[in-house]
Amino acid sequence: MDVQYISTKLKENSVSTFSAERLVFFREVESTQDIAKELAIMGFKDGTVILAEAQTKGRGRMNRKWLSPPGGIWFSTILRPNIEIDRLPILNFVSSLAVTKAVKRLYGLEVYCKWPNDVVVGNKKLSGSLIEAEVLHNSIIYSIIGIGVNVNNEIPDEIKESSTSILEALGKRVKIEDLLIEILLQLDKLYQEFISGFYIKILNEWKTYTNFLGKVVYIIRNGEKIRGVAVDVDAQGSLLLRLQDDSLMRIRHGEMSMRLI
Ligand code: ADP
């Protein structure tokens, strides 16, 4: 990873939050998310990005394994938004929208946002995010967005069926630094909107990058499959599912995974 190149490009663009001075780079770590937490506790600023070439213990939601071999983009960023805590789930849309817009802009691939925070090509996961926060007395001490994108890396066998990479989708290797920079620039713009309270704008834009609304999906909750039509995503970021008996079920993100049928 050419960190000098990334710094120069970030300096050339006017970024508000994710500045070159706040980039922390490692060749290999257990988890960028855990380092971000430690640095956040130490007082590192809003916009600090912890980037690694590889993670040995990357994690997804509910401590699921996130495989992070060299060749992908694996980073976590420290944020200190001064917002109501019930708006934190909107960060799921900020992160998946930033990745989707960046990938579309650079490579023109048909990528979509999948509720709550994945980015897919067809039915395969290209990117995932993890949002965590430390909250005290209803205010946010820090929040961390972790983002993983399969770029030039081999997809490990255990997730071959369900995952893809830029290399696989595009049929060629790309300059990984350029994608990271574009993601950070998109993230920077969306994060300004987020802290300015433009939640509905973010959500509405996110919806234009989805392809599951109006379709039959199933939700897996505690091992149980719930089938319905994905009608909408509401202002809190919950999925509205129309069930077979015509009732409406509101599903908060978190414990749930959504699959397209
Ligand atoms: P989901 O939202 O799909 O339920 P998570 O966001 O919790 O899942 O991410 C963890 C899951 O993602 C793992 O259980 C694994 O199936 C899958 N996974 C792990 N590493 C990768 C990767 N590099 N690319 C795509 N998917 C991955």
Image: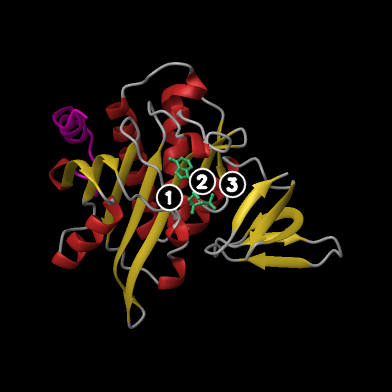
- Mark 2, secondary structure of its residue: strand
Quadrant where the C terminus is found in the figure: top right
Residue denoted by label 1: 129
Q: Disc 3 marks which amino acid?
A: Lys
Residue 250 is situated, as x and y percent measured from the top left of the image, at 67, 67
Q: Is residue 2 magenta?
A: yes
* Discs 2, 1 touching: Cβ within 8 Å: yes
Q: Is mark 2 within 8 Å of ligand 1?
A: yes
Residue denoted by label 2: 118
Q: Mark 1 to mark 3: distance in Å?
A: 17 Å
Tell how many labels. Answer: 3
Quadrant where the N terminus is found in the figure: top left
Q: Mark 2 to mark 3: distance in Å?
A: 13 Å
Upstream in sequence: badge 2 or badge 1: 2
Residue at image position (39%, 48%) is 190
Q: Quadrant of residue 91?
A: bottom left
Q: Disc 2 marks which amino acid?
A: Asp
Residue at image position (31%, 40%) is 184
Image color mode:
secondary structure
Q: Is residue 157 magenta?
A: no
Do we see residue 219 in this rendering? Answer: yes
Residue denoted by label 3: 207
Residues in magenta, as a range: 1-19
Q: Is mark 1 within 8 Å of ligand 1?
A: yes
Upstream in sequence: badge 2 or badge 3: 2
Upstream in sequence: badge 1 or badge 3: 1
Q: Is residue 168 left or right of residue 83?
A: right
Q: Is residue 244 left or right of residue 229?
A: right
Q: Which mark lies nearer to you, 2 or 3?
A: 2
Residue farthest to the bottom? Answer: 137
Q: Is residue 212 left or right of residue 148?
A: right
